[in-house]
Image: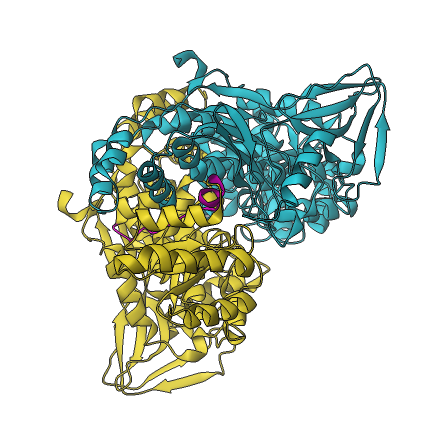
Chain colours: A cyan, B yellow
Amino acid sequence: MENLIRFDVTNERNLTMLVDFYELTMGNGYFNKGVQDKIAYFDMFFRKIPDDGGYCIMAGVEQLIQYLNNLNFTNSDIEFLKSKNLFSEEFLEYLRNFKFECDVWAIPEGNFVFPYQPLVTVRGPVVQAQFIETMLLLTINHQTLIATKANRICRAAAGRTVMEFGSRRAQGYDGAIYGSRAAIIGGCDSTACTISDKYFNVPAVGTMAHSWVQLFDSEYEAFKAWAESYPDNCSLLIDTYNVLKSGLPNAIKVFDEVLKPLGKRPNSIRIDSGDIAYLTKKCRKILDDAGYKDCRILVSNSLDEHIIRDVLNQGACIDAFGVGERLITAKSEPVFGGVYKLVAVENDDKIVPKIKISENTEKITNPGFKKIYRIFDKDTDNAIADLITLHDEVIDETKPLEIFHPIETWKRKRITNFYAKELMVKIFDKGNLVYKSPSVLEIKEFSKKESKKMWPEILRFENPHTYYVDLSQKLWDLKQELLHRGSY
Amino acid sequence: MENLIRFDVTNERNLTMLVDFYELTMGNGYFNKGVQDKIAYFDMFFRKIPDDGGYCIMAGVEQLIQYLNNLNFTNSDIEFLKSKNLFSEEFLEYLRNFKFECDVWAIPEGNFVFPYQPLVTVRGPVVQAQFIETMLLLTINHQTLIATKANRICRAAAGRTVMEFGSRRAQGYDGAIYGSRAAIIGGCDSTACTISDKYFNVPAVGTMAHSWVQLFDSEYEAFKAWAESYPDNCSLLIDTYNVLKSGLPNAIKVFDEVLKPLGKRPNSIRIDSGDIAYLTKKCRKILDDAGYKDCRILVSNSLDEHIIRDVLNQGACIDAFGVGERLITAKSEPVFGGVYKLVAVENDDKIVPKIKISENTEKITNPGFKKIYRIFDKDTDNAIADLITLHDEVIDETKPLEIFHPIETWKRKRITNFYAKELMVKIFDKGNLVYKSPSVLEIKEFSKKESKKMWPEILRFENPHTYYVDLSQKLWDLKQELLHRGSY
C-alpha cells in the first residue's frame, strides 16, 4: 500500500473526528435499527459553477485518499464520544475497530468538471459511506473551488507568470497549504507558501517586504543590501515610498552600481500599490531607456481575473502577477456547493435507486449507480458532451449517438464520428487503495492538455456556453419513474 | 510553561514552515548584512471592517500563542531549505537552533476591535519578528473574520439559537476547526464540527441528513426509526420530499405513535429548503394545533444575517438557525485584510520610529512603539473612544481628555468623568509565554459582556457609526514629522 501514497500530510494528525456530529448520530441510529451494513451508494456532485463560469477544475482527490486511508478512532476519540451518553456500546466498539470497506470512484484531479455529474461515487455499508460525507465534501469543495478560481486568473493573465501569494489571508492553515496546491493545479506557476513546496514539490518564490526597505536608513541602502545578498536573483520592491520619484530611480542606481560591475542582470522590480496600468507603462519605458529591457515587472495588490484582464487591455507592461487574497479565498464566490446524496441502496444484491425530491427542480437528484462518459470528436479531439449513464451501460462508438437536454427534451443532438471516455476511475476497492495520485505538477500539465479539448465558448468569462451534461435514455426514464411515484 | 497551554492542536504537526518564502530570503539577507539582531517593532492591524460593519471581534490569539511557542525547524526543514542553494550556512545554523526571543502584546480574544489600532505588537530581533508575519496574519485574520461574521449573524437572530453548520463548505480542514472555534467566540451556541467539541469543549450538535430518510422504505419508517433511537432528543428533518404534504404529517404521526406512549416530548423539526418564512408559520400552527407547542422549529439553508433578519421581520416562527457556508467562509466578504508593518527599530537602545508612506492616505502606517487605551464613561461604562498613544504615555484620569480626529483635526471632543483601560496585554516576554488563554466559552461570555459597553450605533448593520480611534497629540505630531520628512 505504502507505495501508492506520496507525502502524507494527514499522517501528522488524525482528522477522523473532523465530522459533522449528525454522521455519528446517524451511525448510531443505523446500529440501533440493525441496518448499518446495508449497502448504500452516494454521489458527490455540485449544482452551480462559481463566478457564473463555464467549467470547474477537479481537485483534492489525493487528500481525500489520504483521509480515507487513515480513518481510525483513537482511544481518546472513543472516550470523548462515550462521554456524550448518546452512543451504544455496540456502535462505539465498531468505531474502535473501524476498518474502511467502501468502493470509491472519483474523477481524477485536473479534469474539467460540470454541474450534476458525480465527481465522487461511494458504495459501501451505509454506516461508513455516510460517515465520510463531511471530509469528502470539505476536501473536494475546497480544492476544486481554488483550482477553478486559479484557472480563471491564469486564463486572464494570458500566458504571463502567475504566483500564488495568499497565505496570510487564507482561511486557516490548510486554506493556505492545500489552497496553494489547488492553485498550482489550476495553473499558477509558483507559490509563496514554503511548506507547500516542501510537501508537494511545487516551486516556492519570494523576495522582500516593505519592512526590508524600511529597516535600512534609506531605500537606496536597502536595495543595495539586497542586491549584494542576491546578485543572481535581484528583485526589488519599489513602492515603499514613491514608485517613480524614489523606488525606480533607486533601483536603477543599484542595478548600475552593484549588479553591473559584477556582470549581473536584475531579475525584476515589483509594484504592490497604486495604478498598476499607469505605473508599469512608465516603469517599462524608464527601465528600457536605462538599458534594462530584460528586467521583468511584477505586480501584486488585490488582483483577480477581472483586474488582470482590464489592466492588460490598457496596455499595462507586466511580466508576472502575484495574486493573493482574491485567489486563496476565491473572494468573488468563496463557496463551492458540492453535496453528497444517497442515490441507491442494495436489497438482496439488487440495486434500488433512490431520489431526493425538491420544489426546486435543480435540487432533485439523479438516482442510481452511475458512470460518466465524455464524448470527444474523433477528428478534433474536442469534448462535445458528457453523458451520465447507469453503471452497466456501454456506449457503442460505431453507431450514431443521440443525446438530449434532460429538461427541455426536444433539444436533441445526433453525434457521429466520436469516441467515448469514462471519466471516473476506481480509487478504493472494498477499502483498499487501488489508485496512485499523480504529482501536483503532473496534474497541472494534464489539466492544461485537457483545456485544449474544451471549446473556447466554454472557457470565456462572460456568458460562457453551457457544456452539455446529459442523461442516457435509460437513466432519464428511471428518474421520471421515481419522480412520478408520488408517495413516500 | 506547560500549564499555560490548553489542548494544543499545533503540537500534532509542525507549522514552522508555513511561511511566505520571502520571510526566509529576508532572514538570510539580514544575516548577510549582519543586521539580524537589530531590534524591530511590528504592528498587526487592519484597515477595513468586513461587510461595512461597525466593529470586529478579535480572535485567534490562543492559536498564535501555540504557534509561537512551538516554533522549531526539523532536520528535514533544514535539508529542504539547503536544497534551494540560496541560504547561507550561518543562517541555516541559526534556524537549526532557533529559539523564540520576542516580546509580544495582543488584544485578548473576544474584544471589540477597530481599524488602525494594533491588534498585535511584536518586538524582537528583526530576523524573528519578521519571520512570524505569515502565521500571525493567517491566524488572526482568519479567526477575527469568522468571529466577526458570527457576531453579526447572532445579532440578527436576536437571542434565538444559532448553530454553526459549515464544515463541509469550509476552506480546508482548519477552516472548519478554527472557524467553528471563532464562530462560538462570535456568539454561536453550538457547532456541527465534532472535533471542535473535542478540542475546545464547545457543544457539538446534529441529528439526521436527508439520506437517513431516503434509506428507509418510507419517510414515516425513517422518522419512526429515529424516534425509537432517540426518544429523549427527537429532531426530525421534514423536507426530504414535501414539508407540508408529507414531512410534517409523518413527523406528528411519529410523535403521537412513538413518543407519546413513552411519555416523551419531541425536541424539534428541521426545514432545510423552501420558503422558510411561509413554511415555519404553517408548521408552527399545525404543531400547536396537534398539541406540540413545545416542539421547536429549526431552519437551515444558505442563511446569513440579512436573510435571518428578513424572515424574522416577516414573522417566521423559528427557534434555531443552522448557519453553514455563509458563516464558515464569511461569504459576503471572505477576506480580513490584516497587515503587519514595521513601525520602529532600536538604534543603541533608542527607539527610532518608522513609517510606510503611500499615495493612499489610509495605507500610511502609524509609526512608533504604541499602546491603546479604551476610554469608558465612568457612569454608564460605555466605550467612548480608543486612543492610540506612544508606549510611555499615561492618561491622567483626573483631568479632562481632549481627543481629535486624526485627519479632520478640527473635529475635537473633550471627555470628562471617564476611566481608561489598556487594551493590549503582554503574551510573550523575551520569548517566554506569560499569558494563559481563557477557554473558548469564557471568551464568548467576555465578548458578550463587552458588547453591552458598545453604543448601539456601532452595532447596527446599515451605516453604523464609526467608532473613534484617535491618536494622542504626541503620536500625531510624530507621524506628521515623519510624513513631511520627504527623503528616503
Q: Position of residue A53 (x, y in %)?
A: 70, 43
What span is colored magenta in the figure? B201-215
Q: Quadrant of residue A382?
A: top right
**Left or right, A410 with reference to A185:** right
Task: Please identify the quarter of the rendering in which residue B69 is found.
Answer: top left
Q: How many marks?
A: 0
- On screen, residue B364 versus residue B346, left or right, reads right
| Residue at 66% from the left image edge and 50% from the top image edge | A361
Check if residue B203 falls in the magenta segment. yes
Please identify the quarter of the rendering in which residue A11 is found.
top left
Look at the picture and state if B49 lies above or below A144. Answer: below
The x, y position of residue B309, in whole percent, is: 50, 71
Q: Tell me what residue is drawn at x 23 percent, y 56 percent.
A: B426
Main SS category, magenta section: loop
Mark yes or no: residue A218 visible: yes
Q: Residue A69 in the image: x percent, y percent?
A: 39, 23
Residue B137 place in picture, x, y as percent: 41, 48
User: Viewer-proximal residue, A483 or A272?
Assistant: A483
Magenta span includes B263: no
Camera sees residue A48:
no
* Image quadrant where one finds the N terminus of chain A: top left
